[in-house]
Amino acid sequence: MQKDSCEQPTPTATFSTTSMNSIQLKNVPHVVAKLLNYYHSTPQRERSLGVFPTITTTSWRDLTSSDLQAVVQAVDPVLATVYAVPCVSQLFLPGNPDVALSYRWSATLGDIHDGLCSACRLEETVWVDILFNGQNTALTPEAVLELTPKRYQNARRHVLLVTSTQDLELLLRRGWICFEIAVRMISDKPMVELLDPHRKASALFQSGRLHRDFFADMETFQPEDKTLIQGAIRKLFTSGDSYLAGADPTHNFNRGVSDFVNLTGGKHLVADLAEAACWERITETAWTLSQEMYDKGKFSDCLFVREHVLTATQHVHGHDHINVAASLMGIGNVYQAQGEYDLALAKHEESLRIKIKVLGHEHIDVAKSLEGIGLVYRNLGRYEEALAQHNEALRISRSKLGDDHTDVAKSLANIGIVYQILGKWQAALAKHDEALRIRR
């Protein structure tokens, strides 16, 4: 993440105690995060976490390399005295992160450490700062614009840290944070996670969607950076497959940030309700939230919410209730969208079992489950089994809805697709023609 203009450290393959004391490490947060990660599963783990609090109240901008050397000295005195320090030199190696963390530049290492521990776990590789690239040169804003998508779009998780001294509205005015959020919006990865350990954003969530011209209101330390960032955002939201891509990129960006606030807030609320065992409130409100996530292609976030809905529904109604079957089918649909077909099949089959038990085999909801199972079989390449499911769904739909219902047309079309895959062209044509007749 781009910070205030500052000189970048010059990395070397070796570090000595003497030389390190004179070097200013302006991007210490990611270095310390990686260092803690390095020692997390080693016998020195407790020692590394023990020395860290001594510098957690210091702003990252005020830290020097001697602070980093102190951490190394505490966790491994022998290694620290050696001229070559592999654990330090390895910190500067590039690579796609598991977790990318956005935060306001005034955050202290204490804020960052608490955030990493509570949300990301130190077992995961965390790049707090994008500026590890090319540290022997002063990165220009243009270079950061090029590097940001490579890190924030490809990270498995992207977390936005709200510290004890900031609030979400302030963070969403920071131009570089806006750009980091923007590149994540248009990706197929989970949406940005909000790390708000002090629950400072709760009131904002409860007030509903945050509507503001985020594009025009963004702020940067260097005024010229704002123009660069706005140009990059316009480009991101003008083309692409995202639901946000369209003719008015500034409007779509503002809508995307508003969606982020709303959906992330809803996700927080679901987690809080589950922790408080407020199961009925989850069943009443969370499904709509999950559907909005599904429609926007944020399948991992949708799965998180739907799994909580399933747990809540089981608490409220028991395990063999029709609403439990609906939750299982919804989870199966998410797995299917993610390409996790075996997991999808298991959820659809469990949903079908409950529906048959509660409603009987000849119910239209049973036909819907059979259609879902048929689609999964098709994706698994089990075409004869797919045909059997679609044909049974067709039989039930005709029996309950008549020959000219859209559900009947859907079954016919699905059968036609399987016949196409099998190369049975005449049979496929007959089914598609019949489906088309109904839909007209």
Image (tube, helix red, strand yellow):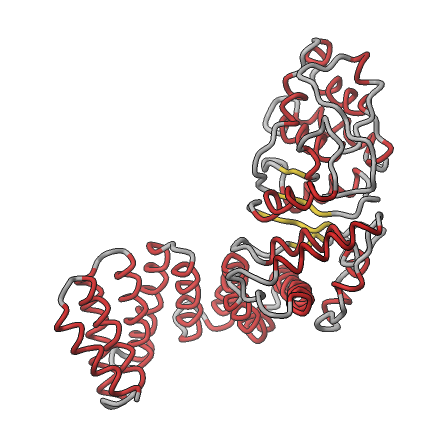
Q: Residue at x 39, y 68 (%)?
A: 329
Is residue 292 placed above or below 185 in the rendered structure?
A: below
Residue 312 in view in this figure: no
Residue 54, picture quadrant: top right
Q: Which residue is drawn at 78% across and 50% down?
A: 225
Residue 190 in view in this figure: yes
| Residue 113 place in picture, x, y as percent | 73, 39
| Residue 206 place in picture, x, y as percent | 73, 70
Residue 276, picture quadrant: bottom right
Is residue 51 placed above or below 171 in the rendered structure?
A: above
Question: In which quadrant is the C terminus drawn?
Answer: bottom left
Question: In which quadrant is the N terminus drawn?
Answer: top right
Is 373 positioned to the left or the right of 135 in the image? left
| Residue 307 place in picture, x, y as percent | 50, 61
| Residue 127 place in picture, x, y as percent | 65, 38
Q: Residue at x 65, y 56 (%)?
A: 182
Is 401 positioned to the left or the right of 178 in the image? left
User: In the image shown, does 432 or 162 lie closer to the viewer?
Assistant: 432
Q: Residue at x 79, y 13 (%)?
A: 17
